[in-house]
Amino acid sequence: MKLTLFTDDLREVPADLLAVGVFSDEPDRGLAFSHLNAALDGVLEQACRDERFRGEAGQSVLFNAAGGLAARRVLVYGFGERRLYDPESARRFAGTVSRTCRTAGAASAALVLTIRDVPAPAERIVDLVQALAEGSELGSYAFLPYRTKDAEPTRLKDLRVCFAAEDVQGVKGAMLRDALARGQVVASAVAGARDLVNEPPNTLTPTAFAEAAKKMAKTAGLGLRILGPRDLERQRMGLMLGVAKGSEEEPRLIHLIHEPESVGKKAPLLTLVGKGLTFDSGGLSLKDTENMLPMKSDMGGAAAVFGAMKALADLKVPCRVHGIIGAVENMPDGRAIRPSDVLRSRKGLTVEVVNTDAEGRLVLADLISYALDLKPTELIDVATLTGACMVALGRSMAGAFVDDDEMARDLEAAWLRSGERFWRMPIDGEMREELKSDVADLKNLGERFGGAISAALFLREFAGPDLARFAHLDIAGPVMANRDQGYVSKGGTGFGVRTLVEYARRRSTLSSTRE
């Protein structure tokens, strides 16, 4: 998509669709709407009244402009109350416009940049422009490689971001163009993660995942190391190999490396660890049909790490980041691990498997041990780990388990700016007792209640006490969407990519003053 800036009269913008957002608590609907309504002799306001449009969040009205504008159609979108307006509101607005363009057959559009308070700080305006770029790109996303009958819908190819020059005084045009470009890079990485989650499990095998990483690393300029079964045996990764035993598909450990030449080898190292179950049947603790159907998405954490590493490389973020992905299938056959089996981890701890469907934490435990050999300054694992987290937080919010308050604040700043929804969850040390085994050092599952917390405690055991900056992100809920809404399409969401990228960007600027 071509993204450009436009500062001329809104009546002159050449586009198939012109979109403007309004607030529900602004009686005259704002200057941009009033300007367009006057050019259309008041019929735009009449159309909004006819459709009972009140500017509530997510409401929209599509109007065919018969004359008075260069644009063929006008979309009026509701932001809700002015005080609640933020970059995420802009992102949803742009996504709605892109999706509307697909259904209306529009190939070009123009978005009016809405600023809550004028004048506004430069950073806030830049964030809004980046959000518009992300939303417009992601709103046009569609996963179509296996469609043979339906024609591909019209995609938005040309987008203009419109604003009055006086509204962005003090903000250089180069800053706004950089924001557009950055938004496109991040959106492309999110779309790549969506593609991986949406890919059928018979084609996205662990081997195919490794091949996708190889192709991406070459294009993005990332370092890469791939470990197969024999390498994993030499690494003594008994937990990950145990999960893979029941499948004919061989496991792969994918190690992506972002170390720009401008950053010294002694700079802080962030490691991102992703759970990559390309399909999870539950193993011998077999899932029922309803719960098994979405399990191609059980590699959503790995997809988030994959997308984040791509974006960091493309943006040339000046920080050291390693992405470590464990790609494996969990299947039931005669070789599969059994409940009551005891496995030996890479760290040396033994684990009693009380449920083969609690396999993700086994894979992550060995990956964390592998990552610790790199001597990271901080480690974040991302995983579709527990249904318990979905019960607690629903489908649109992820759980963040962090026991270091400073890291929690840094993560919160990242997810708030990215627009992704997380909630900090407790790590209750008293629940560690639930993981005690009668025959091994640990068991892989505690009691039903507090299941997301005991899973985080299991992983914390392998991260060890010396790594203060450790976070476990359970993204089981928001990794898949069951309907189109705003910039989110039904299916894989690419959740986590934006937060990881923003966190790494923040660390690249903060590390020089903190470390």
Image (cartoon, rainbow, N blue to C red):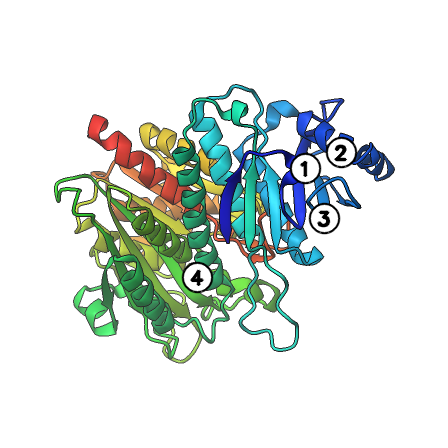
Say whether disc 1 or disc 2 marks the residue closer to the N-terminus.
1
Cα separation between marks 2 and 4: 66 Å
- Viewer-proximal residue among 84 and 218: 218
Cα separation between marks 3 and 4: 59 Å
Please give the residue where the numbered disc 4 appears in the rendered image.
355
Instruction: Give the residue type that dot 3 points to.
Output: Arg
Say whether disc 2 or disc 4 marks the residue closer to the N-terminus.
2
- Viewer-proximal residue among 365 and 325: 325
Instruction: Give the residue type that dot 4 points to.
Output: Asn
Categorize mark 2 by other alpha carbons within 10 Å: few (<14), some (14-19), many (20+). some
Instruction: Give the foreground label among 3 and 4.
Output: 3
Residue at point 55%, 34% (across, down): 7
Cα separation between marks 4 and 1: 64 Å
Say whether disc 3 or disc 1 marks the residue closer to the N-terminus.
1
Q: Is residue 182 left or right of residue 316?
A: right
Please indicate, yes or no, whether residue 385 appears anywhere in the rendered image: no
Please give the residue where the numbered disc 3 appears in the rendered image.
72
Whether the residues at callouts 1 and 2 have beta carbons within 8 Å, the answer is: yes
Q: Is residue 399 above or below residue 38?
A: below
- Viewer-proximal residue among 240 and 434: 240
Cα separation between marks 3 and 2: 13 Å
Please give the residue where the numbered disc 1 appears in the rendered image.
11
Cα separation between marks 1 and 2: 7 Å
Residue at point 42%, 69% (across, down): 330
Please give the residue where the numbered disc 2 appears in the rendered image.
39
Please indicate, yes or no, whether residue 57 appears anywhere in the rendered image: yes
The image quarter containing residue 103 is: bottom right
Instruction: Give the residue type that dot 2 points to.
Output: Ala
